[in-house]
Image: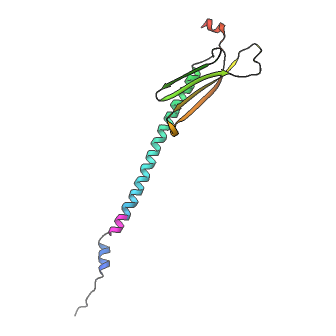
C-alpha cells in the first residue's frame, strides 16, 4: 500500500509565480522611481536654461558698460530690451570730495539687466566708474 501524499495548496501556488500583491508593490516602486528620475532630469534642464539666460544677461551688461568710454556732462539714462532681456543703463555723478577742483569728474555707471516675470523674475547689475566727456574730446571725435 502506498502512503498518501498530502499537498499543501499554499506551497504549490507560491512556487508557481508572484501574487497580485507582490506585482502591485513592484509597480508602485517602479512608478516612484520613474517619477524621481523624471523630476531630476527636468530640474537639470531648467538649471541649464537658467545658466544660459544668466550668461546672456551678463554678456549684455558687459557690452553696455564697454559701449561707453566717457559719459556726457549731466549723466545718462537709457533703457531697452534685447531677446527677452530688459536692460537699463544709468550714470550719475560720483562724489569724490574734489568736485570744486578742476579735473575729470567721475560718474557711477550702472548696467542693470532683468529677465523673467513675477516671482521667477531675476536681475543682475554691474557698476563701474567712468570720466566725464570733455568738450575738447567731443570736437576730436
To which quarter of the image does residue 15 belong? Answer: bottom left
To which quarter of the image does residue 65 belong? Answer: top right
- Across and down, in percent, residue 78 comes to 56, 21
In magenta segment, residue 23:
yes
| Furthest-top residue in this view | 139
- Across and down, in percent, residue 80 comes to 51, 23
Of 51 and 102, the residue lying toward us: 102
Of 11 and 133, the residue lying toward us: 133
| Furthest-bottom residue in this view | 1
The part of the chain drawn in magenta is 19-24
Q: Is residue 81 above or below residue 9?
A: above
Point 29% across, 75% down: residue: 13
In magenta segment, residue 14:
no
Point 69% across, 19% down: residue: 106
Point 62% across, 8% down: residue: 138
| Furthest-left residue in this view | 1
Quadrant (top left/top right/bottom left/bottom right) for the C terminus: top right
Quadrant (top left/top right/bottom left/bottom right) for the N terminus: bottom left
- Across and down, in percent, residue 52 comes to 49, 34
Amino acid at each position: 500500500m502506498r502512503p498518501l501524499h498530502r499537498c499543501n495548496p499554499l506551497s504549490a501556488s507560491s512556487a508557481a509565480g508572484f501574487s497580485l500583491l507582490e506585482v502591485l508593490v513592484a509597480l508602485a516602486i517602479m512608478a516612484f522611481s520613474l517619477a524621481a528620475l523624471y523630476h531630476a532630469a527636468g530640474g537639470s534642464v531648467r538649471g541649464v536654461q537658467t545658466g544660459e539666460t544668466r550668461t546672456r544677461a551678463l554678456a549684455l551688461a558687459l557690452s553696455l558698460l564697454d559701449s561707453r568710454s566717457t559719459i556726457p556732462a549731466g549723466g545718462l539714462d537709457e533703457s531697452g530690451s534685447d531677446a527677452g532681456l530688459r536692460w537699463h543703463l544709468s550714470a550719475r555723478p560720483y562724489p569724490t570730495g574734489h568736485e570744486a577742483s578742476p579735473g575729470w569728474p567721475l560718474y557711477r555707471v550702472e548696467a542693470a539687466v532683468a529677465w523673467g516675470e513675477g516671482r521667477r523674475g531675476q536681475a543682475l547689475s554691474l557698476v563701474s566708474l567712468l570720466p566725464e566727456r570733455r568738450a575738447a574730446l567731443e570736437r576730436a571725435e
